[in-house]
Image (spheres, helix red, strand yellow):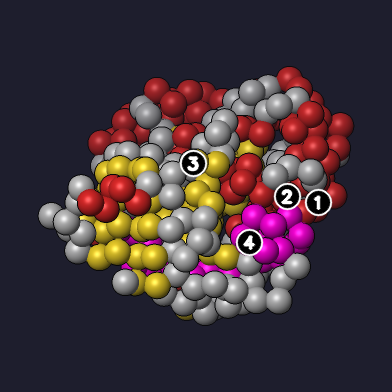
Amino acid sequence: MTIIAIKNIGTLVSGDIKKPISSSNTIIIEDGKIAKLGNEELLKQYQCDKVIDAKGITVTPGLIDSHVHPVIGDFTPRQNTLGFIDSSLHGGVTTMISAGECHTPGRPKDVAGTKALAILAHKSFQNMRPGGVKLHGGALILEKGLTEKDFEELAREGVWLVGEIGLGSINKPEDAAPMVEWAKKHGFKTMMHTGGTSIPGSTTVTAADVMQVNPHVVSHLNGGPTAIPIEEVKKLIDETSITLEMVQCGNFKVFKQAIEWLKEKNQLDRVILGNDSPSGTGIIPLGILRSVCFIASMTGVSAEEALCMATGNTARVYGLNVGIIEEGREADLVLMDAPMGSVGKNCIQALEAGDLPGISMVIIDGKLVATKSRNTPPPAIKAVVC
Ligand SMILES: [Zn+2]
């Protein structure tokens, strides 16, 4: 058994938006899972193989990007770029959720082909984690001709995601609704593109369409990249309880307004954060941190609550055993501090001041996978391995 301790944590962000700050300052990790939370007294009870001194900086759950468009491996043909997943790790992202492998060169659009692609991407990313990042790939793109038997078969092969509806030939709500029912029946999580057309071939999706289809997640409520009219955003907030995703590659005016409305309604637990990248907007390794920073500095929501939108909220919606720092969860953690030169004195203050924090360490399943971020500015204080 391998036991790792993290001590001297200044601020521990739990990931649970109902109680975003934990009073613990020490974490014990056993074989990749969080075993115990408490204070430094814990160190006397465990024979630790490694002790990390956080030196008073902030620890958060690893960030989750709820909207990524991968292909296979750490390559995107959309921007002809290698290594975008590993780059995101250096922005604190430890889990990614595919919203559909729509950029696959020559993507097959028949029933057998779309199923084969989902199975291939799912199994490929299970066997290979770029940079250590847990990418949940194989998000089925809905095409005409799929039957309930196909969902049953895909579920048997482990596929559990339906990519954003609207990417494939199923783009009318009356065609999508029965498929979403089959998908739900067989344990899939479903998401639906919302807003204007993103790329040639995809379709404009309105609030009424989303309400008719009733997916688990409204993909990019703030547009991907073109948002629905603000009255429709309000309708989805007020008249449904669907999870609402905000993306970095979207409309910031709608982003801000939607968060403010949800704060007023005390429904911030409905928000999850994605990048919607690689896309036409590009590759944004710091995108999830940038969205957290945008919320914390521009909407009156606290930085710790914003961090929970990128961690515990997403884990809850997708049923993942990450995203919250509690006993039994996979030990995916980010250690960060205010960047050098920030007016903020710690990670939380820096985010609320509009500065991106500096990442000192990223841990996945209890293993140190990055000890110095190549993408954030340097943290004012660095954690050290004792
Ligand atoms: Zn989309």
Q: Which residue is mark 1?
A: 298
Query: Dot 3 surroundings within 10 Å: few (below 14), some, or many (20 or more)?
Result: some
Q: Which residue is mark 4?
A: 346
Real-space Cα distance between discs 1 and 4? 18 Å
Q: Is residue 236 above or below residue 33?
A: above
Front residue of 200/29: it is 29
Q: Secondary structure at mark 4?
A: loop
* 5 displayed left or right of 241: left
Residue at 31% across, 36% down: 155
Query: Dot 1 surroundings within 10 Å: few (below 14), some, or many (20 or more)?
Result: some
Q: Tell me the quarter of the picture where residue 218 sits.
A: top right
> Range of the magenta residues?
344-370
Label drawn at residue 139: none
Front residue of 342/285: it is 342
Does the residue at mark 1 contact the one at mark 2 (Cβ under 8 Å)? yes
Q: Earlier in the sequence, mark 3 or mark 2?
A: 3
Real-space Cα distance between discs 2 and 4? 17 Å
Front residue of 106/365: it is 365
Instruction: Point out the frontmost of discs 3 and 1.
Output: 3
Amino acid type, residue under disc 2 in the picture: Ile
Which image quarter holds the N terminus? bottom left
